[in-house]
Amino acid sequence: MRISEVAAATGLSVDTLRFYEKIGLIDPPPRDGAGRRVYDDAVLAWIRFIGQLNATGMKQADRVRYARLRAAGDSTLRARREMLEAHREVMRAQMVTLQETLQLMDQKVNYYRELEGKSEDV
């Protein structure tokens, strides 16, 4: 699969894919006779996963560290698991904060609706 096809399939730009390769988030793919990158299908699942890590707020440096651990093979399974467990706890704390904030927003919205209703009665 060419880089343009990976870009289309992932929603990332070609420049982003090249950047990911440069910083070590994705492995440099082999190249064809003309020097063009040729990605295998597995890269799509990997890009999806690192995109999900990004969406959870994992810092880029941590995503790169995880990618390096992954590239190092099975000897890093424990380190990767521990890294994901630690990040999962950060996510849980963020979810609690978001839930509390959502409740506050709901209260404020209801408060303003009540005020609007009272002003319409006048």
Image (spheres, grey):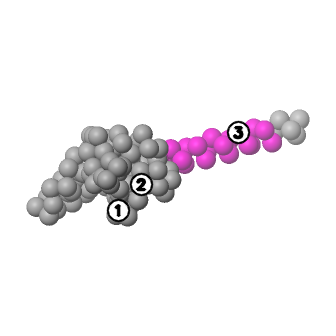
User: x, y (%) of residue 76?
Assistant: 14, 58
Query: What secondary structure is marked by label 2?
Result: loop
Q: Which residues are magenta?
A: 96-117
Q: Residue at x 30, y 45 (%)?
A: 21
Is disc 1 placed on a helix, strand or loop? loop
Residue in the picture at 75% in, 38% down = 115
Question: Where's the N terminus, which quadrant?
Answer: bottom left
Of the residues tagged 1 and 3, which is closer to the observer? 1
Q: Residue 94: horizontal and vertical position, in percent?
A: 39, 47
Q: Amino acid at mark 1?
A: Asp
Q: Please identify the dominant SS of the magenta region.
A: helix
Task: Determine if residue 104 is in view.
Answer: yes
Q: Looking at this rendering, what residue extends furthest in the right direction?
A: 122
Mark 3 highlights which residue?
A: 112
Report if residue 111 lies within the magenta region. yes
Across and down, in percent, residue 28 comes to 27, 49
Which of the two discs, 2 and 3, labels the residue nearer the N terminus? 2
